[in-house]
Image (cartoon, helix red, strand yellow):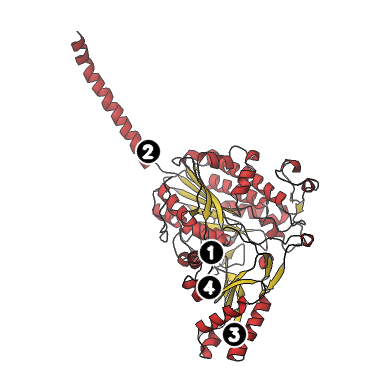
Amino acid sequence: MTNRTNRKLTPTIAAALVAAFSLMQVQAARAVTRRPALVVGIMVDGLSMDYIELLRDQFAQNGFRRLLENGLTINDLDYGTWVDPAAATGIIYTGASPDVNGVAGATVYDRDTRRSKSVFFDASTLGNYTTETLSPGALTSSTLADEVRIDGGGVAYAYSIAPEPAEAIIMAGHAGNSAFWINDATGRWATTTFYKDLPAPPQEANRRAPLDRRLDTLQWVPSIPVDRFPDLPAHKKLYPFRNIFQRGNTNRFRAYKNSPAVNADVTDMAADYIRALQLGKRDATDMLSLGLTVQPYLYGRDPDNRVELMDSYLRLDRDLARLFDAIDRHGPGMDRTLVFVAGTPLTRRQRRDDEKWAVPFGEFSSRKAVSLLNMYLMALYGNGDWVSGYHEGQIYLNHNLIKERGKDLDEIRRESARFLTRMAGVQHAWSVDDVIDRRAGDNPDAIRRNTSLATAGDVFLSIAPGWQATDDDSDTESASTIVRAGAPTAPAFILGPDVKARTVESPVDARVLAPTVAGILRIRAPNGAAQPRIRP
């Protein structure tokens, strides 16, 4: 009786097993072939893990907490040496350092005009809503956006939105649809004719709600009662800050771009892109890249701007939550979206402490350094204009004059470095040959790879901590900086449907982020990315 029952059940069991196995194969195939429909890359200038941990209890559930609790957290993304946001963005998006990708900073020195210019200056292009003529020509390797577009055969979209042009262009790459930024002179959303796509959202914003009108009534005050900010001394709780952006102030738009108000506008624009362009809702993986900031605010009355800084983090947390909500509401959903957030090192553009604290202080003038060096070289080699100029801690020699006089360029570089080392405020000076041969600084390999020889100067200066370094020939507010030593690191996060929640405590080379993201998307890594990826 029992044997007959088992024989009758055997075909049924077998059929059920076959069906179950077939279903498992289908589900496994779907799991293998399904990849994110949308990738959102977010660069945050000045992001610090210390402040994220300090304010964690103040954050809502869907912003930073979502990244911390559900994704891969990298506490220290190591850039090797201090780099500006443009160079950091280039490292993240290409997976390569400036010696490979060509971008060592947002600006470069022009030996012909003896002035600085955008690293992406290109006279063959025109600007839309700007007089700037820019293109990604200086970027010498492919980017994540390029690889997304190439993988999609041109069907995939890749857009970028950022306050600054250099970061927007790097994030859009060579093959992106468009890159939009905020013009310093007009406050308008601007782009370059290099990119052929002109999406409607930024054009609508320029027409219907231009920033120059909205700033008249915009003010930045604390988003929570001041006594709720942690770790504040009593005197900081007595006088809440109030920052406005007055018409007639020549730095009006730059101040706005240094405030959390710009993050809110970039987030709003991102939501409009997702909704209007239906990003992530087609048969391709689309990419949207954003530039945000939590850099210390430089335009307030009080040099102690820690309250503004904490308020920037709280507001950024809300903006991230709004972005994630927009992806759920109007995009493919967060379950089909890969998000990566990477910070850039804290800026060296900081204000001097009040003199009453008697912290040792000095002033390094680039004009004085150039003048004294030129007199020294004249004493050695005869009358002439031996020094062309100074830019971002580098001295540029007059190569044409050196060639005309038949002098040894390497020798003059060495003599210049020796002389400048003895100048007050100069901690170290190296010739570019020292950099090339990896004899410069405490981390010579990092200094070499973060130097683009195509735009590098002849002598590299390290200014002493606490000194105010002034670029006398620059007309921007960043011309004067208070030098502070610090690790060139920032946190990073990766959040996606197949990314396990974990934290990497030890420092991670910043160049690994691009191949890691590419691996999750199952596309090629950018062509300059040589680092192994993290397995999420």
Indicate which disc, 2 or 3, sits on the residue closer to the N terminus: 2
Position of 425 relative to 78 (above/below): below
Q: Secondary structure at mark 1?
A: loop
Indicate which disc, 1 or 2, sits on the residue closer to the N terminus: 2
Task: State the separation of the CA atoms marked 4 and 3.
Answer: 17 Å
Taking depth in this image into account, of 492 and 164 the one nearest to the observer is 492
- Residue 476 visible in the displayed image: no
Q: Secondary structure at mark 3?
A: loop
Position of 8 relative to 171 (above/below): above
- Residue 1 visible in the displayed image: yes
Image coordinates of residue 230 in percent, x first then y, are: 70, 43
Name the kind of residue labelled 2 in the image.
Ala
Which residue: 64% across, 47% down?
313
Residue underneath mark 3? 386
Image coordinates of residue 241 in percent, x first then y, are: 77, 50
Q: Residues within 10 Å of mark 2 (few under 14, many from 20)?
A: few
Which residue: 39% across, 53% down?
151
Numbered disc in front, either 3 or 1: 3
Residue underneath mark 1? 193
Residue underneath mark 2? 31
Task: State the separation of the CA atoms marked 3 and 1.
Answer: 39 Å
Task: State the separation of the CA atoms marked 2 and 4.
Answer: 48 Å
Task: State the separation of the CA atoms marked 1 and 2.
Answer: 41 Å
Q: Residues within 10 Å of mark 4 (few under 14, many from 20)?
A: some
Name the kind of residue labelled 4 in the image.
Ala
Image coordinates of residue 486 in percent, x first then y, are: 60, 59
Q: Secondary structure at mark 4?
A: loop
Marks 2 & 3, CB-CB < 8 Å contact: no
Residue underneath mark 4? 456
Side (left or right) of 63 relative to 36: right
